[in-house]
Image (spheres, rainbow, N blue to C red):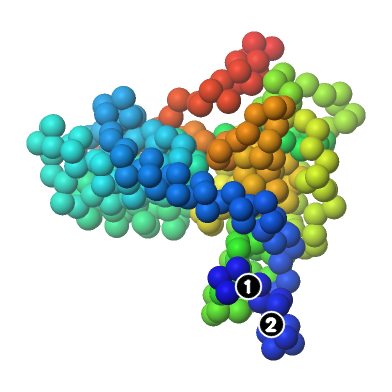
Amino acid sequence: MANQSYFDSPTAATIDYPVPLSPPLPDLSKDIEPNRALTASSKSSLFTLSRSHVIFEDEWLIALNKPQGIYCENVLSALPDLLNDTGAKVSELHLANRLDRDTSGVMLITKLHKVAAKFVKAFTDHKVRKTYLAFCVGLAPKWEKITVKSGHGRSKYGAWRVYAASDAGRKLPGGSAVRDMETSFEVLSVNGLGYVKEVSDLQKDEAVVVVQEKSVIGCDLKKDEILVRASPRSGRTHQIRLHCQYLGIPIRGDVRYEGVYEWKGSIYDGHELHAESLSFEHPITGEPILLQAPPPSWATQPLRSQFEQ
């Protein structure tokens, strides 16, 4: 019954619950995701860290470049062996941020409980800025920059879904509630080229979409390759992936949210989302910190094209 939707229940259907605006999980994902999880579990159990994974380290923090297809918990459990080489304490290690299994990039770990508590507050107060890179396949958008504001939630047995912004705070089956989520996007390239369009074809100012109804953009109209930079204000589960789906540009390989599985003769074993940067005020020294993970190969060429123009 784990895959049951609350809309399958005749009793629940009579209750005034908010209705999700993004579609349920595609059938394809129900076949592929379990195999991906098994592969990642095997790969993660053998994972070891080296100094090449380290982006930043001091006596309070360490930032790592997490590979795709590795669970965060396995990165954390592999860290003591690396720190033991330096004689550092390992008893209070804590994940300051979490990344999905197939999301690569900046993963921050605190070394002391008091520092972990400071980061919980910093994230809650939106004082940590995050950027991600995502390789999407869909119709090239007419906007260059856009901010999406919506609701976010799931039922007791359901998947994460987009809800109307006005549904924030309303109860869902299982006892949870719809929460707000907000993401800003910027197009970096379309079809491997820097984003160049006629001014008349673009929104002249940054567009803001406050979600109140289902998207009119179909994800089945897969035509263009779009590299975007995403900046989430909130930190909801699968937030960027859900908003890309809603915008009609699902992330390549993200079969859970209508992303292509096969594209141009290749099969993608995971989604192409990369935690590019974290910036914040150091919780102990007060110094501004910018942590950046090198872009993966799928983003390198589009980014190079962006700067060459």
Residue plotted at (32% across, 44% down): 45
Which amino acid is tagged 2? Ser
Query: To which residue does mark 2 refer?
Result: 9
Residue 82 vs residue 146, the one in the foreground: 82
The furthest residue to the top: 308
Residue 114 vs residue 25, the one in the foreground: 25
Q: Is residue 21 above or below residue 6?
A: above
Position of the N terminus, as image quadrant, is bottom right
Left or right placement of residue 140 versus residue 6 in this view = right
- SS at mark 2? loop
Which amino acid is tagged 1? Gln
Can you give x and y, in whole percent of width and height, for residue 53 in the image? 33, 29
| Label 2 Cα crowd, 10 Å radius (few <14 / some 14-19 / many 20+) | few
Left or right placement of residue 161 versus residue 23 in this view = left
Left or right placement of residue 36 versus residue 20 in this view = left
Position of the C terminus, as image quadrant, is top right
Q: Is residue 195 above or below residue 219?
A: above
Label 1 to label 2, Cα distance in Å? 9 Å
Query: To which residue does mark 1 refer?
Result: 4
Can you give x and y, in whole percent of width and height, for residue 57 in the image? 26, 33
Q: Is residue 179 above or below residue 13?
A: above
Residue plotted at (22% across, 55% down): 113
Left or right placement of residue 243 versus residue 44 in this view = right
Residue 300 vs residue 129, the one in the foreground: 300
Can you give x and y, in whole percent of width and height, for residue 4 in the image? 63, 72
Answer with mark 1 or mark 2, whichever residue precedes in sequence.
1
- SS at mark 1? loop
The answer to whether marks 1 and 2 mark residues whose Cβ atoms lie closer than 8 Å is yes
Residue plotted at (32% across, 38% down): 47
How many labels, in total?
Answer: 2
The furthest residue to the left: 87
Task: Locate residue 220: give its quadrant.
Answer: top right
